[in-house]
Amino acid sequence: MATRTETCTEVAVRASPNPFSWEVLEDEPKVQRTCIGRSFRSTEYEILHTGGFVRLCTERGRVYWLAQNEHDHRLPDWKLHFSVHISDVPRAWNVMSELFLSQACDFGMKAVAGEALDSWPDEQRGRELTVYIFQDHPVYKGGGPMMGYCPGFEHNFWLGPEFERDSAFWLNFVVLAEDALAAAGVRSRGTAHGDLSLGHYASLRNEAFIFEPSEQLYIYPPNESGWNAAGHICPLQLPFHIRLGVECTAGLAKLRKLRASRGCCSRRQR
């Protein structure tokens, strides 16, 4: 078992070499690795290798996940998913982790870990890589769950509106990711069932839990419940063609429900 710690303190926004390349992480998955990225502010990134995922995140990202757990995953939980052929996940990770660092992203991203690739479930097809979109919420008022526990280091753990990235940032991120993945020869598996397609690889989904009446508890939104089952405000100003598709899909769903209800009434009258 590896016990040493490797720390990268070089500027993480350089294009090469990637301090968090898949090959390095898979060679020694339990070695602690951090990297200081410098853009408009210094950001410390680290690797977590747990639960069948490889995560590239910041301390603020870990607090965000803690807050989600504390509130039973009912807060807005927006994610960009990237659909990647299983055998291309290592190549896609290298592309996306470099992009994540070069764009000075905060919070986190993840990919299916090497040991979990063969058992990745079909119902999660199209979500092989994930980038988290932080959205502020009133429950974070005062900085979030770590305030009062980290005197002198509050700035590392603070959750607030100043850490939101706007729609333009994320839409540009999607464009850059689409181009970089295609240039690297990464293959897509198609948009995940239940996600809103944003491109050949990228899709959007809010995975905030929803109430299940039959079980009387909140559950992870099934694929059939769509891309925003909780009905939270979308953080992206969607392009017209995507908005049009969303509206058409919603209209068709309403029409099907109306026809089904009328058919039921007709059968009862007979």
Image: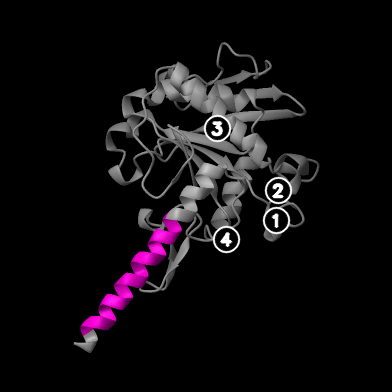
- List x then y, in percent, for residue 10: 67, 15
Residue displayed at 33% across by 34% down: 116
Q: Which residue is mark 1?
A: 140
Q: Earlier in the sequence, mark 1 or mark 4?
A: 4
Please tell me which of labels 2 and 1 falls first in the chain. Answer: 1
Reading the image, the residue beneath label 3 is: 174
Between discs 2 and 3, the one toward the N terminus = 2
Amino acid type of the residue that numbered disc 3 sits on in the rendered structure: Val
Of label 4 and label 3, which has the lower sequence position?
Answer: 4
- Per the rendering, the mark at residue 71 is 4
Q: Quadrant of the C terminus?
A: bottom left
Query: What residue is pinned by disc 2?
Result: 159
Helix, strand or loop for the magenta stretch, by majority: helix
Seen from the viewer's position, the closer of residues 201 and 144 is 201
The answer to whether one can see residue 31 in this image is no
Q: Position of residue 49 (x, y in %)?
A: 46, 33
Residue range (magenta): 249-267
